[in-house]
Amino acid sequence: MATIVGAATALSASKSFDSRKLHLPSRRSLSVSERKGSFLVVRSDGSVVHKAHRAQKLIANAVATKADSSAASTASKPGHELLLFEALREGLEEEMDRDPTVCVMGEDVGHYGGSYKVTKGLATKYGDLRVLDTPIAENSFTGMGIGAAMTGLRPIVEGMNMGFLLLAFNQISNNCGMLHYTSGGQFKIPIVIRGPGGVGRQLGAEHSQRLESYFQSIPGIQMVACSTPYNAKGLMKAAIRSENPVILFEHVLLYNLKERIPDEEYVCSLEEAEMVRPGEHVTILTYSRMRYHVMQAAKTLVNKGYDPEVIDIRSLKPFDLHTIGNSVKKTHRVLIVEECMRTGGIGASLTAAITENFNDYLDAPIICLSSQDVPTPYAGTLEEWTVVQPAQIVTAVEQLCQ
Protein backbone atom coordinates (compact mmCIF):
# COMPACT_ATOMS: atom_id res chain seq x y z
CA MET A 1 0.00 0.00 0.00
CA ALA A 2 3.04 2.24 0.14
CA THR A 3 2.65 2.93 -3.55
CA ILE A 4 -0.87 4.35 -3.02
CA VAL A 5 0.32 6.54 -0.18
CA GLY A 6 3.22 7.71 -2.31
CA ALA A 7 0.92 8.68 -5.15
CA ALA A 8 -1.40 10.61 -2.84
CA THR A 9 1.53 12.36 -1.18
CA ALA A 10 3.01 13.40 -4.51
CA LEU A 11 -0.24 15.03 -5.56
CA SER A 12 -1.17 16.63 -2.27
CA ALA A 13 2.29 18.17 -1.92
CA SER A 14 1.59 20.56 -4.80
CA LYS A 15 0.92 24.09 -3.59
CA SER A 16 -1.61 24.82 -6.32
CA PHE A 17 -3.70 21.67 -6.08
CA ASP A 18 -6.03 20.36 -3.41
CA SER A 19 -7.25 16.83 -4.12
CA ARG A 20 -10.38 17.48 -2.04
CA LYS A 21 -11.47 20.11 -4.56
CA LEU A 22 -11.18 17.82 -7.54
CA HIS A 23 -14.62 16.52 -8.51
CA LEU A 24 -14.76 14.58 -11.75
CA PRO A 25 -18.23 14.45 -13.33
CA SER A 26 -19.73 10.97 -13.14
CA ARG A 27 -20.53 9.19 -16.37
CA ARG A 28 -24.22 9.19 -15.40
CA SER A 29 -24.23 12.99 -15.22
CA LEU A 30 -23.07 13.26 -18.84
CA SER A 31 -25.33 12.90 -21.85
CA VAL A 32 -24.92 9.91 -24.15
CA SER A 33 -23.22 12.02 -26.81
CA GLU A 34 -20.83 13.50 -24.25
CA ARG A 35 -19.88 10.08 -22.92
CA LYS A 36 -19.09 8.78 -26.39
CA GLY A 37 -17.13 11.77 -27.65
CA SER A 38 -15.41 13.63 -24.85
CA PHE A 39 -12.39 13.85 -22.62
CA LEU A 40 -11.35 15.67 -19.47
CA VAL A 41 -8.51 18.12 -19.01
CA VAL A 42 -7.35 18.24 -15.37
CA ARG A 43 -5.31 21.37 -14.77
CA SER A 44 -2.74 21.83 -12.02
CA ASP A 45 -5.08 24.16 -10.09
CA GLY A 46 -7.59 21.33 -9.75
CA SER A 47 -10.08 22.66 -12.30
CA VAL A 48 -11.67 20.19 -14.70
CA VAL A 49 -12.51 21.15 -18.28
CA HIS A 50 -14.84 18.95 -20.33
CA LYS A 51 -13.97 18.84 -24.04
CA ALA A 52 -15.43 17.05 -27.01
CA HIS A 53 -13.66 15.22 -29.78
CA ARG A 54 -14.63 13.63 -33.08
CA ALA A 55 -16.04 10.14 -32.76
CA GLN A 56 -14.15 7.49 -34.70
CA LYS A 57 -15.14 4.11 -36.11
CA LEU A 58 -13.52 1.07 -34.50
CA ILE A 59 -12.10 -1.70 -36.65
CA ALA A 60 -12.24 -4.75 -34.39
CA ASN A 61 -10.12 -7.11 -36.48
CA ALA A 62 -7.61 -4.86 -38.20
CA VAL A 63 -4.73 -6.70 -39.86
CA ALA A 64 -1.47 -5.07 -40.89
CA THR A 65 -0.97 -5.03 -44.64
CA LYS A 66 2.34 -5.97 -46.20
CA ALA A 67 4.59 -2.96 -46.75
CA ASP A 68 4.93 -1.85 -50.37
CA SER A 69 8.31 -0.53 -51.45
CA SER A 70 6.82 1.52 -54.25
CA ALA A 71 6.48 5.18 -53.37
CA ALA A 72 3.73 5.62 -55.95
CA SER A 73 1.55 2.82 -54.56
CA THR A 74 2.13 4.06 -51.00
CA ALA A 75 0.98 7.53 -51.91
CA SER A 76 -2.22 6.13 -53.45
CA LYS A 77 -3.21 4.19 -50.33
CA PRO A 78 -5.87 5.66 -48.02
CA GLY A 79 -4.80 6.91 -44.61
CA HIS A 80 -2.06 9.21 -43.42
CA GLU A 81 1.70 8.94 -43.06
CA LEU A 82 3.28 8.98 -39.61
CA LEU A 83 6.68 8.35 -38.13
CA LEU A 84 6.74 5.60 -35.53
CA PHE A 85 7.03 7.98 -32.58
CA GLU A 86 4.12 10.00 -33.98
CA ALA A 87 2.05 6.82 -34.30
CA LEU A 88 2.72 6.03 -30.64
CA ARG A 89 1.61 9.55 -29.73
CA GLU A 90 -1.54 9.31 -31.86
CA GLY A 91 -2.52 6.04 -30.19
CA LEU A 92 -1.86 7.49 -26.75
CA GLU A 93 -3.80 10.64 -27.54
CA GLU A 94 -6.81 8.72 -28.86
CA GLU A 95 -6.95 6.67 -25.66
CA MET A 96 -6.63 9.77 -23.47
CA ASP A 97 -9.54 11.26 -25.40
CA ARG A 98 -11.58 8.08 -24.99
CA ASP A 99 -10.90 7.40 -21.31
CA PRO A 100 -10.34 10.13 -18.67
CA THR A 101 -8.58 7.63 -16.37
CA VAL A 102 -5.62 7.32 -18.78
CA CYS A 103 -2.62 9.34 -17.61
CA VAL A 104 1.11 9.56 -18.33
CA MET A 105 4.04 9.91 -15.95
CA GLY A 106 7.78 9.91 -16.31
CA GLU A 107 10.86 12.08 -16.65
CA ASP A 108 10.40 15.03 -19.03
CA VAL A 109 7.14 13.63 -20.45
CA GLY A 110 5.33 16.93 -19.86
CA HIS A 111 6.11 20.21 -21.56
CA TYR A 112 9.41 18.91 -22.94
CA GLY A 113 7.46 16.15 -24.71
CA GLY A 114 9.58 13.16 -23.75
CA SER A 115 13.14 12.31 -24.75
CA TYR A 116 11.91 11.06 -28.16
CA LYS A 117 8.87 13.39 -28.36
CA VAL A 118 6.28 10.65 -27.97
CA THR A 119 4.30 12.82 -25.51
CA LYS A 120 4.89 16.17 -27.23
CA GLY A 121 1.93 18.53 -26.82
CA LEU A 122 -0.04 16.27 -24.47
CA ALA A 123 0.63 18.30 -21.32
CA THR A 124 -0.75 21.44 -22.97
CA LYS A 125 -3.86 19.58 -24.12
CA TYR A 126 -4.65 17.50 -21.03
CA GLY A 127 -3.05 19.38 -18.14
CA ASP A 128 -0.19 18.77 -15.76
CA LEU A 129 -1.94 16.08 -13.71
CA ARG A 130 -2.74 13.76 -16.59
CA VAL A 131 0.75 14.24 -18.04
CA LEU A 132 2.90 14.28 -14.93
CA ASP A 133 6.58 15.21 -14.95
CA THR A 134 8.45 13.24 -12.29
CA PRO A 135 11.85 13.48 -10.59
CA ILE A 136 14.71 11.28 -11.78
CA ALA A 137 13.60 8.38 -9.58
CA GLU A 138 12.42 5.36 -11.56
CA ASN A 139 11.61 3.23 -8.53
CA SER A 140 9.45 6.00 -7.06
CA PHE A 141 7.37 6.99 -10.07
CA THR A 142 6.98 3.37 -11.24
CA GLY A 143 5.69 2.50 -7.78
CA MET A 144 3.40 5.53 -7.91
CA GLY A 145 2.07 4.37 -11.27
CA ILE A 146 1.32 0.90 -9.89
CA GLY A 147 -0.48 2.48 -6.94
CA ALA A 148 -2.48 4.68 -9.32
CA ALA A 149 -3.47 1.59 -11.33
CA MET A 150 -4.64 -0.12 -8.14
CA THR A 151 -6.98 2.79 -7.41
CA GLY A 152 -8.65 2.80 -10.84
CA LEU A 153 -6.44 4.86 -13.15
CA ARG A 154 -4.72 3.60 -16.30
CA PRO A 155 -1.20 5.04 -16.12
CA ILE A 156 1.44 4.88 -18.83
CA VAL A 157 4.89 4.99 -17.24
CA GLU A 158 7.69 6.08 -19.57
CA GLY A 159 11.23 5.04 -18.90
CA MET A 160 13.52 7.58 -20.56
CA ASN A 161 15.67 4.57 -21.42
CA MET A 162 14.74 0.95 -20.78
CA GLY A 163 18.04 0.42 -18.96
CA PHE A 164 16.94 2.87 -16.29
CA LEU A 165 13.95 0.67 -15.43
CA LEU A 166 16.31 -1.77 -13.74
CA LEU A 167 16.10 0.69 -10.85
CA ALA A 168 12.38 -0.15 -10.66
CA PHE A 169 12.78 -3.91 -11.04
CA ASN A 170 11.48 -4.55 -7.52
CA GLN A 171 8.30 -2.54 -8.17
CA ILE A 172 7.74 -4.20 -11.57
CA SER A 173 8.40 -7.72 -10.28
CA ASN A 174 7.04 -7.84 -6.75
CA ASN A 175 4.20 -5.33 -7.16
CA CYS A 176 3.20 -4.88 -10.79
CA GLY A 177 3.29 -8.54 -11.77
CA MET A 178 2.06 -10.15 -8.58
CA LEU A 179 -0.44 -7.87 -6.80
CA HIS A 180 -3.47 -9.14 -8.72
CA TYR A 181 -2.64 -12.66 -7.53
CA THR A 182 -1.42 -11.88 -4.02
CA SER A 183 -4.49 -9.72 -3.34
CA GLY A 184 -6.77 -12.60 -4.28
CA GLY A 185 -8.05 -10.68 -7.30
CA GLN A 186 -9.00 -7.59 -5.29
CA PHE A 187 -6.70 -5.36 -7.36
CA LYS A 188 -6.16 -5.07 -11.09
CA ILE A 189 -3.00 -3.42 -12.38
CA PRO A 190 -3.90 -1.92 -15.81
CA ILE A 191 -0.56 -0.19 -16.33
CA VAL A 192 1.64 0.25 -19.41
CA ILE A 193 5.40 0.53 -18.97
CA ARG A 194 7.11 1.71 -22.15
CA GLY A 195 10.28 3.30 -23.43
CA PRO A 196 13.21 3.09 -25.84
CA GLY A 197 15.78 0.33 -25.72
CA GLY A 198 18.08 -1.72 -27.91
CA VAL A 199 21.44 -1.02 -29.49
CA GLY A 200 21.45 2.49 -30.93
CA ARG A 201 24.27 4.43 -32.53
CA GLN A 202 27.18 4.39 -30.09
CA LEU A 203 25.09 4.95 -26.96
CA GLY A 204 27.39 2.84 -24.81
CA ALA A 205 26.71 -0.29 -22.79
CA GLU A 206 24.37 1.16 -20.16
CA HIS A 207 22.14 2.82 -22.78
CA SER A 208 22.03 -0.18 -25.13
CA GLN A 209 20.18 -2.62 -22.89
CA ARG A 210 17.74 -5.22 -24.16
CA LEU A 211 15.62 -5.97 -21.10
CA GLU A 212 13.20 -8.47 -22.66
CA SER A 213 15.13 -11.34 -21.07
CA TYR A 214 15.09 -9.65 -17.67
CA PHE A 215 11.31 -9.25 -17.52
CA GLN A 216 10.11 -12.40 -19.32
CA SER A 217 10.28 -14.55 -16.19
CA ILE A 218 8.03 -12.26 -14.12
CA PRO A 219 4.61 -13.90 -13.72
CA GLY A 220 1.56 -11.77 -14.46
CA ILE A 221 3.18 -9.44 -17.02
CA GLN A 222 2.62 -9.29 -20.78
CA MET A 223 5.37 -8.09 -23.13
CA VAL A 224 5.07 -6.78 -26.69
CA ALA A 225 7.57 -5.18 -29.07
CA CYS A 226 6.55 -2.77 -31.84
CA SER A 227 8.40 -2.61 -35.15
CA THR A 228 6.29 -0.45 -37.51
CA PRO A 229 4.19 2.71 -37.10
CA TYR A 230 1.08 0.59 -37.74
CA ASN A 231 1.66 -1.93 -34.98
CA ALA A 232 3.17 0.71 -32.66
CA LYS A 233 -0.14 2.56 -32.57
CA GLY A 234 -2.26 -0.59 -32.45
CA LEU A 235 -0.24 -2.19 -29.67
CA MET A 236 -0.17 1.05 -27.66
CA LYS A 237 -3.97 1.25 -27.73
CA ALA A 238 -4.37 -2.44 -26.90
CA ALA A 239 -1.89 -2.21 -24.01
CA ILE A 240 -3.74 0.76 -22.49
CA ARG A 241 -7.08 -1.06 -22.69
CA SER A 242 -5.72 -4.29 -21.22
CA GLU A 243 -6.54 -5.17 -17.62
CA ASN A 244 -3.06 -6.68 -17.27
CA PRO A 245 0.27 -4.90 -16.80
CA VAL A 246 1.97 -4.61 -20.20
CA ILE A 247 5.56 -3.72 -21.03
CA LEU A 248 5.85 -2.16 -24.49
CA PHE A 249 9.37 -2.33 -25.94
CA GLU A 250 10.30 0.33 -28.48
CA HIS A 251 13.60 0.39 -30.36
CA VAL A 252 15.61 3.57 -30.30
CA LEU A 253 16.53 3.26 -34.00
CA LEU A 254 12.97 2.76 -35.25
CA TYR A 255 11.34 5.99 -34.07
CA ASN A 256 11.83 7.71 -37.44
CA LEU A 257 10.37 4.92 -39.58
CA LYS A 258 7.53 6.24 -41.74
CA GLU A 259 4.43 4.32 -42.81
CA ARG A 260 0.91 5.06 -44.02
CA ILE A 261 -1.65 3.95 -41.45
CA PRO A 262 -5.48 3.94 -41.58
CA ASP A 263 -7.51 7.02 -40.70
CA GLU A 264 -10.03 4.76 -38.94
CA GLU A 265 -9.42 3.59 -35.40
CA TYR A 266 -7.89 0.11 -35.03
CA VAL A 267 -6.42 -2.02 -32.26
CA CYS A 268 -3.81 -4.78 -32.63
CA SER A 269 -3.95 -7.96 -30.58
CA LEU A 270 -1.40 -8.22 -27.78
CA GLU A 271 -1.04 -11.97 -28.34
CA GLU A 272 -0.75 -12.33 -32.11
CA ALA A 273 2.31 -12.54 -34.33
CA GLU A 274 2.44 -10.83 -37.73
CA MET A 275 3.10 -12.69 -40.97
CA VAL A 276 5.54 -10.35 -42.71
CA ARG A 277 6.44 -12.56 -45.68
CA PRO A 278 4.88 -15.94 -46.54
CA GLY A 279 7.34 -18.60 -47.70
CA GLU A 280 7.96 -22.33 -48.04
CA HIS A 281 11.58 -23.20 -47.23
CA VAL A 282 12.36 -21.88 -43.73
CA THR A 283 10.59 -20.04 -40.91
CA ILE A 284 12.44 -16.96 -39.67
CA LEU A 285 11.14 -15.66 -36.33
CA THR A 286 12.18 -12.17 -35.31
CA TYR A 287 10.96 -8.94 -33.71
CA SER A 288 11.71 -5.23 -33.34
CA ARG A 289 14.75 -3.88 -35.25
CA MET A 290 15.88 -7.33 -36.40
CA ARG A 291 12.78 -7.51 -38.59
CA TYR A 292 14.54 -5.15 -40.98
CA HIS A 293 17.83 -7.06 -40.92
CA VAL A 294 15.84 -10.19 -41.76
CA MET A 295 13.97 -8.53 -44.64
CA GLN A 296 17.24 -7.21 -46.01
CA ALA A 297 18.64 -10.74 -45.90
CA ALA A 298 15.44 -12.10 -47.46
CA LYS A 299 16.11 -10.14 -50.66
CA THR A 300 19.47 -11.87 -51.01
CA LEU A 301 17.96 -15.25 -50.19
CA VAL A 302 15.25 -14.89 -52.85
CA ASN A 303 17.91 -14.07 -55.43
CA LYS A 304 19.67 -17.29 -54.41
CA GLY A 305 16.53 -19.36 -54.89
CA TYR A 306 15.30 -19.62 -51.28
CA ASP A 307 11.76 -18.79 -50.14
CA PRO A 308 11.89 -17.74 -46.47
CA GLU A 309 8.77 -17.19 -44.37
CA VAL A 310 9.27 -14.19 -42.05
CA ILE A 311 7.20 -13.78 -38.88
CA ASP A 312 7.40 -10.79 -36.54
CA ILE A 313 6.44 -12.46 -33.26
CA ARG A 314 5.49 -9.07 -31.65
CA SER A 315 4.13 -10.78 -28.54
CA LEU A 316 7.18 -11.67 -26.46
CA LYS A 317 5.04 -13.06 -23.66
CA PRO A 318 3.01 -15.10 -24.32
CA PHE A 319 4.23 -16.42 -27.69
CA ASP A 320 1.70 -16.85 -30.48
CA LEU A 321 2.32 -20.59 -30.84
CA HIS A 322 -0.64 -20.98 -33.20
CA THR A 323 0.94 -18.82 -35.93
CA ILE A 324 4.43 -20.10 -35.19
CA GLY A 325 3.31 -23.74 -35.14
CA ASN A 326 1.47 -23.51 -38.46
CA SER A 327 4.60 -22.08 -40.05
CA VAL A 328 6.85 -24.79 -38.58
CA LYS A 329 4.51 -27.50 -39.86
CA LYS A 330 4.82 -26.02 -43.35
CA THR A 331 8.57 -25.25 -43.60
CA HIS A 332 10.03 -27.77 -41.08
CA ARG A 333 13.00 -25.46 -40.42
CA VAL A 334 13.34 -22.60 -37.96
CA LEU A 335 15.76 -19.68 -37.67
CA ILE A 336 15.38 -17.24 -34.77
CA VAL A 337 16.93 -13.78 -35.14
CA GLU A 338 16.99 -11.46 -32.13
CA GLU A 339 18.93 -8.53 -30.73
CA CYS A 340 18.56 -9.87 -27.21
CA MET A 341 21.48 -11.62 -25.50
CA ARG A 342 22.02 -15.27 -26.38
CA THR A 343 22.11 -16.58 -22.81
CA GLY A 344 18.61 -16.62 -21.32
CA GLY A 345 17.18 -14.47 -24.12
CA ILE A 346 13.83 -14.51 -25.92
CA GLY A 347 15.37 -16.84 -28.51
CA ALA A 348 16.23 -19.40 -25.85
CA SER A 349 12.64 -19.40 -24.55
CA LEU A 350 11.27 -19.57 -28.09
CA THR A 351 13.57 -22.49 -28.93
CA ALA A 352 12.33 -24.36 -25.86
CA ALA A 353 8.67 -23.69 -26.71
CA ILE A 354 9.05 -24.88 -30.32
CA THR A 355 11.00 -27.97 -29.25
CA GLU A 356 8.37 -28.91 -26.68
CA ASN A 357 5.39 -28.40 -29.00
CA PHE A 358 6.56 -29.02 -32.58
CA ASN A 359 9.69 -31.16 -32.38
CA ASP A 360 8.20 -33.89 -34.59
CA TYR A 361 7.77 -31.41 -37.45
CA LEU A 362 11.41 -30.26 -37.51
CA ASP A 363 13.74 -31.58 -40.20
CA ALA A 364 16.78 -29.72 -38.84
CA PRO A 365 17.95 -28.31 -35.49
CA ILE A 366 16.70 -24.82 -34.62
CA ILE A 367 19.31 -22.11 -35.20
CA CYS A 368 19.22 -18.99 -33.01
CA LEU A 369 21.19 -15.87 -33.95
CA SER A 370 21.52 -13.49 -30.99
CA SER A 371 23.70 -10.64 -29.78
CA GLN A 372 26.98 -11.64 -28.21
CA ASP A 373 27.12 -11.97 -24.43
CA VAL A 374 29.27 -8.87 -23.97
CA PRO A 375 28.56 -5.28 -22.90
CA THR A 376 27.77 -3.28 -26.02
CA PRO A 377 30.97 -1.45 -27.09
CA TYR A 378 30.97 2.28 -27.70
CA ALA A 379 33.14 2.02 -30.85
CA GLY A 380 30.87 1.85 -33.90
CA THR A 381 32.62 -1.02 -35.67
CA LEU A 382 32.76 -3.13 -32.51
CA GLU A 383 29.11 -2.32 -31.79
CA GLU A 384 28.09 -3.74 -35.19
CA TRP A 385 30.01 -6.95 -34.55
CA THR A 386 28.02 -7.66 -31.38
CA VAL A 387 24.66 -7.51 -33.22
CA VAL A 388 23.35 -9.96 -35.86
CA GLN A 389 23.93 -8.69 -39.40
CA PRO A 390 22.08 -9.67 -42.64
CA ALA A 391 25.03 -11.66 -43.99
CA GLN A 392 24.91 -13.94 -40.94
CA ILE A 393 21.21 -14.55 -41.56
CA VAL A 394 21.86 -15.55 -45.17
CA THR A 395 24.59 -17.98 -44.10
CA ALA A 396 22.35 -19.53 -41.44
CA VAL A 397 19.49 -20.12 -43.90
CA GLU A 398 21.87 -21.73 -46.38
CA GLN A 399 23.10 -24.02 -43.62
CA LEU A 400 19.54 -24.95 -42.58
CA CYS A 401 18.40 -25.70 -46.12
CA GLN A 402 21.34 -27.92 -47.13
Image (spheres, rainbow, N blue to C red):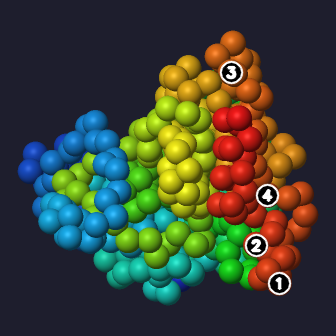
Quickly name the residue at label 1.
379
Viewer-side label of 3, 2:
3
Mark 3 vs mark 4: which is more N-terminal? 3
Mark 3 vs mark 2: which is more N-terminal? 3
* Residue lying farthest to the right in this orientation: 374
The three-letter code of the residue at mark 1 reads: Ala
Quickly name the residue at label 3.
362
Look at the numbered disc 3 and give the secondary structure of its residue: loop
Q: Quadrant of residue 203?
A: bottom right
Viewer-closest of 191 and 197: 197
Viewer-closest of 341 and 271: 341
* Image point (66%, 66%), residue name: 197
Q: Residues within 10 Å of mark 1 (few under 14, many from 20)?
A: few
Look at the numbered disc 4 and give the secondary structure of its residue: strand
* Image point (75%, 64%), residue name: 387
Image x and y of residue 349, in percent: 75, 35
Q: Quadrant of residue 167?
A: bottom right
Viewer-side label of 3, 1:
3
Separation of disc 1 and disc 4 at Cα? Answer: 16 Å
The three-letter code of the residue at mark 3 reads: Leu
* Image point (19%, 54%), residue name: 264
Mark 2 vs mark 1: which is more N-terminal? 1
Separation of disc 3 and disc 1 at Cα? Answer: 39 Å
Quickly name the residue at label 2.
384
Image x and y of residue 347, in percent: 73, 41
* Image point (43%, 38%), residue name: 278
Look at the numbered disc 2 and give the secondary structure of its residue: helix
Q: Quadrant of the C terminus?
A: top right
Q: Is residue 132 left or right of residue 391?
A: left
